[in-house]
């Protein structure tokens, strides 16, 4: 069952229940009001007939109760000439009975004119209580009001006044029929209107569904749901869906770039490993050559094999370090004094180029939160790069400002062109002018991954013929204050 149909059915069910409650309440109120009105009319008529009878017809009372049979009823014109009885309306039936319930008088004076009077009602009347009853008179449903008339504290006779309920019942039946037909018509009309309005309201959701199907089929995350209506629940849903599509598009593009990087990475690794492996295989072939090569040549071959093996070991180590950084390896979070780490790296780096001078200009005592080994590796990579590409002294400068420490490693080398600056952090990327310098193009990517893992930033400025400056920045720890 669709949401549209469920909404329409719920709306129609609520309307139906409301109409049923309204109809039942209206019918009940109308039934009670008409019955109460009839009862009031009967009470008024009974009072009027009682007063008239006591005034003009009292002469026929009392009867002798010792008689074996009650006397036959008399017509009203024989017992009273009061206009109230003479002008008796046809819709009102009046009877006078004695204390035992025997008919005393009726308009025609016939015994069959007696109105129903149950034993329970007679007991109530004998206890001086009025009573309302319904009963069939000539196959017509009647409302009968009976009231006792006491003389000298004794029940003397009973006045019965009755009216037909046929007209009232017919009116109530007509009301019920009208309510049913009108209610059914309104429910059907409301169902149609609800179906139309729910379809209009859910149209943006249908567009979202179609957009989702189209994206799934075409894998085009640039598509968006078009919504020009109000910013209600459906509007917010459309906007949220579009925002989700935007994030999915970004994630999809990142995955695509990641896959491209992985493919390039595998290609570059294969290329870097192929050269030393090819060299090793060729040298092994030379060692197996018959007749054997000379002793001097064998020593050169073994030296080449050692160099290529060490080159592969360095490549594998750097790849492992990069893989750990990519895997989000959790780094330690401890207070690190930066200056001692930089000074230690500088001491260890002197063997890289004993003739190159490294000049330090460090701010006083900055402390950051991070991993000491990772920070040492970062500084070592930056310093190694500067020594490789610089023709003069290397400068390491740190500046503490705005709760942040920035470490700059400055060299005076050939520099990097603007086009190449955007790629220096790509894996295995090395400019053509750097092809003669030993390396794999993994140092800066590793440094970038480690810096970002420590909530820092890294950037590079360079100018051809002038040199380059690599900067790393970290937030200063509160423990430094």
Image (spheres, rainbow, N blue to C red):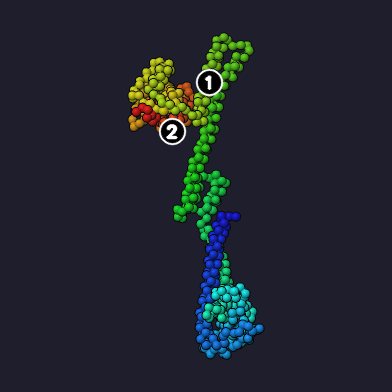
Question: Which element is circle 2 on?
Answer: loop
Question: Percent position (x, y) of residue 76?
Answer: 57, 88
Q: Are circles 2 and 1 on residues that touch, CB within 8 Å?
A: no
Residue 166 left/right relative to 411: right
Q: Earlier in the sequence, mark 2 or mark 1?
A: 1
Is the residue 22 above or below the residue 210 in the image? below
Q: Quadrant of the C terminus?
A: top left
Q: Which mark is residue 422?
A: 2
Question: Which element is circle 1 on?
Answer: helix
**Quadrant of residue 23 in the image?**
bottom right
Residue 448 left/right relative to 132: left
Q: Nearer the viewer, mark 2 or mark 1?
A: 1
- Residue furthest out toward the front: 66
Question: Percent position (x, y) of residue 252?
Answer: 52, 40
Question: Percent position (x, y) of residue 411?
Answer: 38, 24
Is the residue 228 above or below the residue 340 in the image? below
- Residue furthest out toward the top: 295
Given residues 140 and 87, the one toward you in this image is 87
How many numbered callouts? 2
**Quadrant of residue 192 in the image?**
bottom right
Residue wearing tag 1: 313
What residue appears at the point 59 percent right and 81 percent down from the top-left corner?
Answer: 98
């Amino acid at each position: 069952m669709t949401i549209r149909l469920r909404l329409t059915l719920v709306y129609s069910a609520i309307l139906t229940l409301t109409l049923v409650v309204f109809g039942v309440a209206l019918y009940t109120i109308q039934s009670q009001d008409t019955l109460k009105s009839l009862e009031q009319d009967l009470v008024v008529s009974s009072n009027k007939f009682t007063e008239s009878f006591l005034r003009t017809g009292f002469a026929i009372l009392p009867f002798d109760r010792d008689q074996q049979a009650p006397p036959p009823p008399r017509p009203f014109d024989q017992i009273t000439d009061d206009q109230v009885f003479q002008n008796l309306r046809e819709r009102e039936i009046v009877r006078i009975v004695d204390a035992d319930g025997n008919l005393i008088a009726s308009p025609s004076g016939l015994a069959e004119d007696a109105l129903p009077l149950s034993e329970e009602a007679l007991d109530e009347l004998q206890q001086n209580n009025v009573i309302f009853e319904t009963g069939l008179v000539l196959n017509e449903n009647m409302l009968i009001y009976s009231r006792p008339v006491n003389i000298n504290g004794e029940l003397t006779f009973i006045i019965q006044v009755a009216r037909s309920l046929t007209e009232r019942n017919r009116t109530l039946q007509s009301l019920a029929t009208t309510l049913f037909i009108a209610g059914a018509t309104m429910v059907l009309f409301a169902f149609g209107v609800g179906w139309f309005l729910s379809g209009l309201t859910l149209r943006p959701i249908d567009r979202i569904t179609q957009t989702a199907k189209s994206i799934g089929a075409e894998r085009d995350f640039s598509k968006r749901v078009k919504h020009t209506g109000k910013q209600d629940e459906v509007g917010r849903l459309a906007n949220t869906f579009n925002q989700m599509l935007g994030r999915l598009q970004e994630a999809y593009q990142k995955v695509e770039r990641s896959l491209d990087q992985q493919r390039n990475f595998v290609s570059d690794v294969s290329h870097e490993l192929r050269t030393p492996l090819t060299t090793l295989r060729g040298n092994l072939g030379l060692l197996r050559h018959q007749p054997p090569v000379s002793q001097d040549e064998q020593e050169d071959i073994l030296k080449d094999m050692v160099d290529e093996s060490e080159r592969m070991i360095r490549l594998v180590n750097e790849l492992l370090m990069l893989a750990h950084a990519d895997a989000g390896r959790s780094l330690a979070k401890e207070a690190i004094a930066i200056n001692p780490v930089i000074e230690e790296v500088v001491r260890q780096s002197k063997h890289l180029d004993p003739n190159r001078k490294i000049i330090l200009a460090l701010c006083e005592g900055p402390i950051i939160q991070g991993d000491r080994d990772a920070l040492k590796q970062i500084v070592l990579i930056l310093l190694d790069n500067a020594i490789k590409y610089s023709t003069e002294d290397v400068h390491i400068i740190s500046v503490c400002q705005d709760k942040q420490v920035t470490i700059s490693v400055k060299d005076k080398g050939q520099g990097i062109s603007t086009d190449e600056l955007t790629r220096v952090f790509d894996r295995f990327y090395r400019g053509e002018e750097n092809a003669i310098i030993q390396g794999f193009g993994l140092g800066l990517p590793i440094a970038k991954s480690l810096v970002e893992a420590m909530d820092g930033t890294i950037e590079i400025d360079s100018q051809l013929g002038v040199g380059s400056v690599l900067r790393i920045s970290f937030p200063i720890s509160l423990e430094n204050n």
